[in-house]
Amino acid sequence: MFDKILIANRGEIACRVIDTCRRMGVTTVAVFSDADRAARHVQMADQAVHLGGPAPADSYLRGDAIIAAAMATGAQAIHPGYGFLSENPDFVDQVQAAGLVFIGPSGDAIRAMGLKDAAKALMEKAGVPVVPGYHGADQEADHLARMADEIGYPVLVKAVAGGGGKGMRRVDDPADFAQALDSARSEARTAFGNPDVLIEKYVLQPRHIEVQVFGDGKRAVHLFERDCSLQRRHQKVIEEAPAPGMTAEMRQAMGDAAVRAAEAIGYSGAGTIEFIVDGSDGLRPDRFWFMEMNTRLQVEHPVTEAITGIDLVEWQLRVASGEDLPARQQDLTINGHAFEARLYAEDVPAGFLPATGRLAHLGFPASARIETGVRQGDVISPWYDPMIAKVVTWGQTRAVALRSLESALVDTDVAGSVTNLDFLIALTRHDGFSAGQVDTGLIGRDLDALTAPGDDDGASVALAVIGLAGLADPDTQGGMTLWQPLRRTIAWDGGQAVLEVMGPGHARVTLDDRIHDVRWQGDRWWVDGDLCRQRIIHHDAGVSVFGRGTVHLKPVDPLDRAGADDGGDGLTRSPMPGLVKAIHVTQGQQVRAGDRLCVLEAMKMEHSLLASRDGTVAEVLAAQGDQVEAGAALIRLDEVPE
Ligand code: ADP
Ligand code: ADP
Ligand code: MG
């Protein structure tokens, strides 16, 4: 076993690798960018080396600096985590040329699976079923259109170099093919520097079921499947293992195919074979097809760990240090059911826009496994993936594990940034999902219901008002003046209420003409006669009430400049660093509030920036293809003449 390894990553995955290293007595070296000087992974590691500026290209993607850091600190091996350099075969070769061990597959194995077209051809040869379609070299538009006709609509145009759900277009009608091809190609060219595409049959009622494999370079085993069908725009939201409705026959067929795939490329280490499954008629062994292989540890690996009892990072270290595969196929079994939910800093009502902010309060329940790279007080910056945590639960049955996920999410408290927490909770309560009827279209079909604001009965706001008035603070609660009626206005950023203190432990809060009767005793609260399960939390950014939706009240800052979204200067600014994908207006054009002005691409997603009011475009300050900083002015509006 290694004495010391370097972890070439950040955030929750760096922390998770350090956890296992600590348990195994392996010393750890972290690396960090300027934005991560005080990050959790840096604090947890035994040693840490600074790489450079916050942009990944200046830090976590600098293979040479990372190898130099490993040499300088005496680390024997490098764990790449996921993302960043984890699937870069040239980096693997450089690590090995420096005499270090790469904890993962060979550069050649990564190359074999790097492009989806070549990988599909290879898998066909190995006898693994692949999605019917065209993955040849002829990229002529007419030829591709003919192939699409032959395959039969609907089809999926997919970037051969794709990842993260990018460069993919579903086409239902031949008339739309040419345009979809163009847009998939242009997205692929910007994102991956490779415009080539393949055409696939679009599987109806698709389920994403993937198999965890593990190889030692010659032989491989599989650690069963994960169902990742709960996706939004081809990105995973909640994952589970095993797959609901899985039969022994189907599991055997998928497991065998996955092992064949791994052995065909002499795979070493942890990998995932992703399959698309036609779920229109239950799970049937002749209805799954290879999509791609991810040659690394996967974000959702903890659900596999939860049902197998195996620490996959421990296996990675053992195999990379030269040990045999730690178990044989017949030793591996499934116990119970597990879920993982990805908690992100994102603005769901604004279209899942990645958010940033300082986490003024962060609380997790002890009932779940929490994988996180941040602590209370840390900043979710615009530089990296805005993930706050993965919440993982286990139960003897699917129903128990799902209920446990729901309550773990309800008991998760985040203040200081908007999050997708309410959306995740709504998903755990979705009837179809609860019944195990999953497919990749579920979220899209029910998006309105899943993102509808909860029925606000005002109780949480009333409690927050009590908090803001200082009455929920255990130190001042029994204060001298509280026995006498006291009437005052409590204002916060965005609203106000009238508070009347009726006596010790009793107040009335008037919110929009509704009067709420609030009583308390110790830390128990009643609003309008109902005992509340909400939690009132004071932090340095105001007061939050958690437990039934989330309410944050921020005290009014008299220095804050109130103004329209555009700051009153008519400028639409970039909310984050990103790439200008398209400009939809020209100078002199009249726009209405809500019209799309331009599209920005940042952090794996596209965001439309909308006009905050009616007006005329006075100036277009950015061009398609521009890389812009957060706050950069993009479009300026003039007032519409009266
Ligand atoms: P997965 O199927 O595992 O979710 P994706 O194809 O969506 O993978 O993304 C590729 C990997 O890169 C994921 O593991 C994702 O979390 C990781 N990743 C993407 N962006 C970043 C980032 N900025 N920092 C760290 N990891 C990232
Ligand atoms: P990426 O590299 O971006 O992860 P994948 O090929 O793994 O690309 O596909 C991402 C997602 O797109 C899948 O999880 C699935 O939801 C959907 N998808 C991919 N191929 C098909 C297909 N042929 N039919 C239907 N859905 C598909
Ligand atoms: Mg994929």
Image (tube, helix red, strand yellow):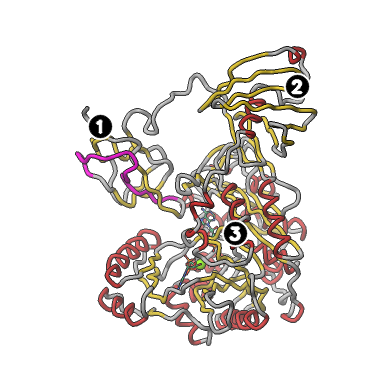
For residue 633, above or below residue 449: above
Which residue is identified by label 2?
A: 477
Q: Amino acid at mark 1?
A: Asp
The span picked out in magenta is: 586-602
Which residue is identified by label 3?
A: 238
Circle 3 SS class = strand
Q: Cβ–Cβ below 8 Å for labels 2 and 1?
A: no
Between marks 2 and 3 in the image, the one whose residue lies nearer the viewer: 2
Q: Residues within 10 Å of mark 1 (few under 14, many from 20)?
A: some
Q: Nearer the viewer, residue 628 or 347?
A: 347
- Whichever of labels 3 and 1 marks the residue nearer the N terminus, that label is 3
Q: CA distance from mark 2 to mark 1?
A: 52 Å
Q: Quadrant of the N terminus?
A: bottom right
Check if residue 587 falls in the magenta segment: yes
Residue 638: which numbered mark, if any?
1
**Residue drawn where x is 69% and y is 69% of the image:** 321
> Residue 452 appears at what percent x and percent y?
52, 47
Is residue 507 visible to us here? yes
Circle 2 SS class = loop
- Whichever of labels 2 and 3 marks the residue nearer the N terminus, that label is 3
Q: CA distance from mark 3 to mark 1?
A: 44 Å
Q: Amino acid at mark 2?
A: Gln
Q: Amino acid at mark 3?
A: Ile
- Whichever of labels 2 and 1 marks the residue nearer the N terminus, that label is 2
Side of 333 where 465 appears, left or right: left
Circle 1 SS class = strand
